[in-house]
């Protein structure tokens, strides 16, 4: 007998009916990776390294978000690229800012200050905001994935 997840992989349209959100499921499947790093070790990680991690986590989140309903690879790519562009990440950071705690705002500030170099097409402020969001995501992924889940759910990506 196949599990619901195996059914999804075989192309069946029904998603598993669980109490966890899509975001929570994604983060819980990767959570064991983050639990191998102590809080004191996280404090030593540079904002640029946190942004590097956050970039990967955010892109994975966007890819998982758009995975269903099934689509052509070109459509997936277009949808995900629209979400991971610096301009969109800057908008997301601005929408999250009212919901952030003081410690999270400090991580955002550190990420903004760590943003060096940028593509010529980008305004430096946009690049700093995008890097700040990635830094926050990387930090929360390592320290408080439940909080990361809450914040990602606030973003309301559009299908």
Image: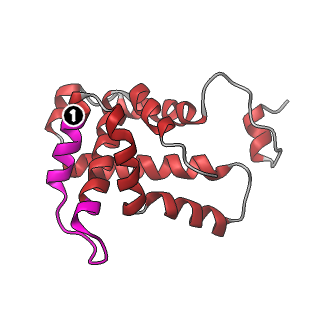
Residue under the image location 60 percent in, 30 percent down = 21
Query: Which of these two is toward me, 116 or 34?
Result: 116
Is 152 left, or right, of 53 in this rendering? Answer: right
Magenta span contains residue 123? yes
Q: Is residue 46 visible?
A: no
Which secondary structure, mark 1?
helix
Please state the horizontal and vertical placement of residue 29, each as a whole percent of the image: 52, 33
Is 140 left, or right, of 159 in this rendering? Answer: left
Image position of 119 with respect to 62: above or below: below
Q: Residues within 10 Å of mark 1 (few under 14, many from 20)?
A: some
What is the image's colouring? secondary structure
Which corner quadrant of the image does residue 23 belong to? top right
Is 96 left, or right, of 10 in this rendering? Answer: left
Magenta span contains residue 88? no
Residue under the image location 23 percent in, 61 percent down = 125
Query: Which of these two is toward me, 31 or 155?
Result: 155
Please state the horizontal and vertical placement of residue 58, each as a whole percent of the image: 43, 48
Residue under the image location 44 percent in, 58 percent down = 84
Q: Is residue 81 visible?
A: yes
Image position of 9 with respect to 42: above or below: below
Please state the horizontal and vertical placement of residue 83, each as a whole percent of the image: 49, 57
Residue hosting label 1: 42
Magenta stretch prevailing secondary structure: helix
Which corner quadrant of the image does residue 74 belong to? bottom right
Residue under the image location 14 percent in, 37 percent down = 44
Q: Which residues are magenta?
A: 105-127
């Amino acid at each position: 007998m196949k599990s619901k997840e195996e059914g999804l992989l075989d192309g069946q349209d029904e998603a598993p009916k669980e109490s966890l959100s899509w975001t929570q499921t994604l983060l819980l499947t990767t959570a064991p990776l983050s639990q191998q790093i102590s809080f004191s070790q996280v404090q030593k990680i540079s904002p640029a390294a946190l942004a590097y991690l956050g970039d990967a986590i955010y892109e994975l989140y966007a890819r998982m978000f758009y995975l269903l309903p099934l689509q052509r690879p070109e459509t997936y790519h277009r949808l995900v690229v629209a979400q991971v562009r610096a301009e969109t990440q800057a908008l997301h950071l601005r929408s999250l800012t009212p919901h952030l705690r003081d410690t999270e705002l400090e991580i955002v500030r550190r990420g903004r200050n760590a943003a060096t170099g940028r593509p010529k097409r980008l305004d430096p402020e946009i690049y700093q905001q995008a890097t700040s969001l990635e830094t926050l995501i990387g930090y929360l992924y390592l320290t408080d994935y439940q909080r990361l889940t809450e914040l990602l759910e606030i973003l309301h990506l559009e299908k």
